[in-house]
Amino acid sequence: MTDVTAAPVTAADSSATARLLAEAAGRIDAPDVVLAMSRGGARTVHTGGSAEPGPVPRERLHHELGSASKPFAGLLLARLVAQGRVRYEDRAADLLAPGLPVHPSVRRITLRHLLTHTSGLPGLPADFYPQAVPRWSTDPYGNYPADRVVRAFLRARPRHRPGTRWHYSNFAVSVLGHTLAAATGTPWEVLLHQQVLAPLGLDATLVRPGPDGTDATGHRRDGTPLPALDTGGFTAAGALRSSPLDLLTFLEAHVGGASGSPTDPSLAAALTEVTRPVLRRGWRHAHTHTLTWFQHPSPYGPVLFHAGATLGQQAFLGFRPGTGLTVVATATRRVHRADTFVATAYGLLTETP
């Protein structure tokens, strides 16, 4: 176990948090497990798992985030809006292919629709599956590049009128990434680094695999190692890799952690914007969402969170704005039906005093 403290904290508090994380980690079956918690900049990180640790500490390895990449895309959009470079109501098709004839529903899809899963687009393009199914457990995304994602969007026939229904869509958030790159004339990877990663000091957060030995290795359910995931043209929806320590820094920025609020007005405005509820969905509209986070009630106030999974790894990010608590969890085993990973991480976020 490794304890990382960035601010003074009592020995009793540190010890209690360490025991809490160790107990939670014991409920997760994976070769590598990292559970990290921060409150007011005081950090505690527990590492474990069934595999022998390598030369690089688990909390410093780059872990695949999968859909937990989406909050980074949301913060990028919010910052570009705060800078006046785009608007939430800008139409994606007009930015991607000005003047190209598209279906009327596609023409109405805005940047806000894409990010909030209200575009009417399916989870993935219809023509994605024939090429992906034969490689579903090894490389389903790699042969579907960016230009194909854009073409699929421009010829799409949305299932519902934009803005009327919520349907989770990797396709839509991927289109958002390509649209922001087109609108700014800057590749997605460069844009994300300039606007989000560098300003927050996230040096261990990458869009592609890092140098040899610096990436966590994912595993199938049976423990077989897997190669790094290639997300093809779905970069904005799930390509990020990050260390648990970097992820704590990312979440701490949302709650005004050890370093306080960012001095750049557009970044500070964006961090506030992405925590503001913008829609409700589900049975009797019981579920609340911000631009990019799921929001639930808890005994200690609202919690905001997002989980993600790749072929062999899982990640969970969450925070409580009212108390400054942040929780990061990663595991290097494929998700399965009886998996306790998300429930365990969510419990740390919602049940910790």
Image (tube, helix red, strand yellow):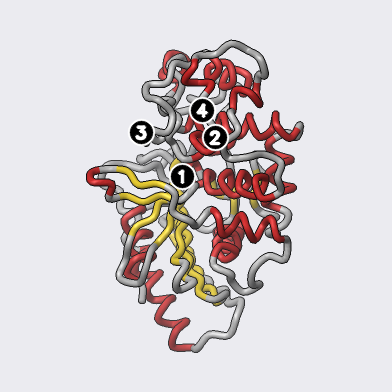
For mark 2, give the secondary structure: loop
Q: How far apart are marks 1 and 3 (CA)?
A: 30 Å
The tag on residue 313 is: 1
Between discs 4 and 1, the one toward the N terminus: 4
Q: Position of residue 74 (x, y in %)?
A: 56, 46
The residue to which callout 3 is attached is 165
Q: Which residue lies at the image location 52% right of the left edge and 38% below the top edge?
A: 112
Residue 226 as seen in the image, left or right of residue 243? left
Q: How far apart are marks 3 and 4 (CA)?
A: 13 Å
Density class for disc 2 (Cα within 10 Å; few <14, some 14-19, many ≥20) is many
Q: Does residue 78 lie above or below 156 as drawn?
A: below
- Whether the residues at callouts 2 and 1 have beta carbons within 8 Å, the answer is yes
Q: How far apart are marks 2 and 1 (CA)?
A: 10 Å
Please identify, in this view, whether the residue under mark 4 or under mark 1 is nearer the observer: 4
The residue to which callout 4 is attached is 109
Q: Distance between the residues labelled 4 and 1?
A: 32 Å
Residue farthest top in this picture = 101
Between discs 3 and 2, the one toward the N terminus: 3
Amino acid at the residue labelled 4: Ile
Between discs 2 and 4, the one toward the N terminus: 4
Amino acid at the residue labelled 2: Leu
Q: Where is residue 295 in the image (x, y as percent from the top left)?
A: 39, 55
Q: Distance between the residues labelled 2 and 4?
A: 29 Å
Give the image quarter of residue 204. bottom right
Q: How far apart are marks 3 and 2 (CA)?
A: 31 Å
Camera-side residue of 318 and 345? 318
- Whether the residues at callouts 1 and 3 have beta carbons within 8 Å, the answer is no
Q: Is residue 46 among what the camera can see?
A: no
The residue to which callout 2 is attached is 229
Q: Is residue 266 among what the camera can see?
A: yes
